[in-house]
Image: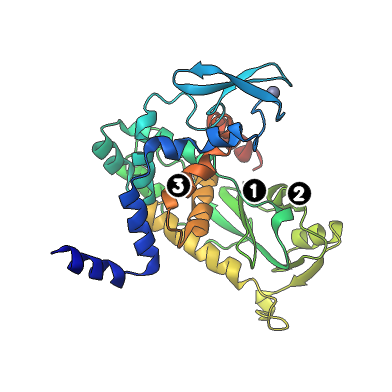
């Protein structure tokens, strides 16, 4: 194929793919991808990871990373302090890992291709996922749908990843039953119609008003209109927040009211989430479920993005609590089990 033919073929690609190709050819380096946080610190766009003060100054380097000293708390930190990359010995492999993650490669394939052991591949996955945030309630606007769905409690992979464990972790389908069994994890999903999405492993068993408060994090704005299936906990939540609440009761065949009020987007998300977890991972351990919800959410956000790698790295580096969250996965899981 000569140049003219190649050019012609490229022009036939959709615009999104042309831009992707361009990024590929420009060859953004590993350093450029990882320097996003350093740039933000240089420009004082983010605060000290210890105390959030923006009074800090450059203070040498530490193992090749830029170091800063904070005038607020007098402590030092680097561009990576608290982020999931903090303390990694193989920083040079981060972008390759992210590429494989975006491609949906299994941990086995990733560890074989990168020459790292499976435990490292698993740890990196959950360090990255521990950095991903959810949209809190105050970001939502207009019609907001909220409803819970259930996942059977699973301890997949807690010791060794055997076939049997996979079987146990599988099949999260058709479990839209209301909190009868306490060995199901309830996931509350809340979304507006602008793409803001919050997904939270709230409790095991029946959900309460307090679970809804905790999962949405910050109260929905006063002019939001909350659509739910009319569960008493949602009624209580709406009343406490003085929100307009539309109950769509499936048992009374109330699927849509006034043409716009329904919870079909949420039901659609529930369906896609379960399919993704069943088909992509053959079920996941309840311990890691919150992390997978973060992954699902960012996938939704990055749909159609021309540089998913850059956006995923940028999003993951914003969270200076990521490493802490990663180390608390077991503690959070014990807490969840205690809600039974
Ligand atoms: Zn500080």
Give the residue drawn at x 66%, y 28%. 48
Asked if the beta carbon under badge 1 is closer than 8 A to the nearest atom of ligand 1, the reply is no
Task: Using the image as rendered, state which of residue 175 and residue 32 is in the foreground.
Answer: 32
Tell me, yes or no, if residue 163 can be seen here: yes
When asked about the image quadrant of residue 144, the answer is bottom right
Disc 2, SS: helix
In x, y percent, where is residue 56?
67, 24
In x, y percent, where is residue 219?
78, 53
Mark 3 neighbour density, 10 Å: few (under 14) some (14–19) many (20 or more): some
Disc 1, SS: strand
In the figure, is residue 246 to the left or right of 67?
right
The earlier-in-sequence mark between 2 and 3 is 2
Q: Is residue 17 above or below residue 131?
A: below
In x, y percent, where is residue 124?
42, 35
For residue 210, the mark is: 2
Q: Nearer the viewer, mark 2 or mark 3?
A: 3
For residue 202, the mark is: 1
C-alpha separation, residue under disc 3 versus residue under disc 1: 31 Å
Residue named by callout 3: 310
In the figure, is residue 219 to the left or right of 167?
right
Task: Using the image as rendered, state which of residue 202 and residue 251 is in the foreground.
Answer: 202
Mark 1 neighbour density, 10 Å: few (under 14) some (14–19) many (20 or more): many
Disc 3, SS: helix
Image quadrant for the N terminus?
A: bottom left
Give the residue drawn at x 60%, y 32%. 41
């Amino acid at each position: 194929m000569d140049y003219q033919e190649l050019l012609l073929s490229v022009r036939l690609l959709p615009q999104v793919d042309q831009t992707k190709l361009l990024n590929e050819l420009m060859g953004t380096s590993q350093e450029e991808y990882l320097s996003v946080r350093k740039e933000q610190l240089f420009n004082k766009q983010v605060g000290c990871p210890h105390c959030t003060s923006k009074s800090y100054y450059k203070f040498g380097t530490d193992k090749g990373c830029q170091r800063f000293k904070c005038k607020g708390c007098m402590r030092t930190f680097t561009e990576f302090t608290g982020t999931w990359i903090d303390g990694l010995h193989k920083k040079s492999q981060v972008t390759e890992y992210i590429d494989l993650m975006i491609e949906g490669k299994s941990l086995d394939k990733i560890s074989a291709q990168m020459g790292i052991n499976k435990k490292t591949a698993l740890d990196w996955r959950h360090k990255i996922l521990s950095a991903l945030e959810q949209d809190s309630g105050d970001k939502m606007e207009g019609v907001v749908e909220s409803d819970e769905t259930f996942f059977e409690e699973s301890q997949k992979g807690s010791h060794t990843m055997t076939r049997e464990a996979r079987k146990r972790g599988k099949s999260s389908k058709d479990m839209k039953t209301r909190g009868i069994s306490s060995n199901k994890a309830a996931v509350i999903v809340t979304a507006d119609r602008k793409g803001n999405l919050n997904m939270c492993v709230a409790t095991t068993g029946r959900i309460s008003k307090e679970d809804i408060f905790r999962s949405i994090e910050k109260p929905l704005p006063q002019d939001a209109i909350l659509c739910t299936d009319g569960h008493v906990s949602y009624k209580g939540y709406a009343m406490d927040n003085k929100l307009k609440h539309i109950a769509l009761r499936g048992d009374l065949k109330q699927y849509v009211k006034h043409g716009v009020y329904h919870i079909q987007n949420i039901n659609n998300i529930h369906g896609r989430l379960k399919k993704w977890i069943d088909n992509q991972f053959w079920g996941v351990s309840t311990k890691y479920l919150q992390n997978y919800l973060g992954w699902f959410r960012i996938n939704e956000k990055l749909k159609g993005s021309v540089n998913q790698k850059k956006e995923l790295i940028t999003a993951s580096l914003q969270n200076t609590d990521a490493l802490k969250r990663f180390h608390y996965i077991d503690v959070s899981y014990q807490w969840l089990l205690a809600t039974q």
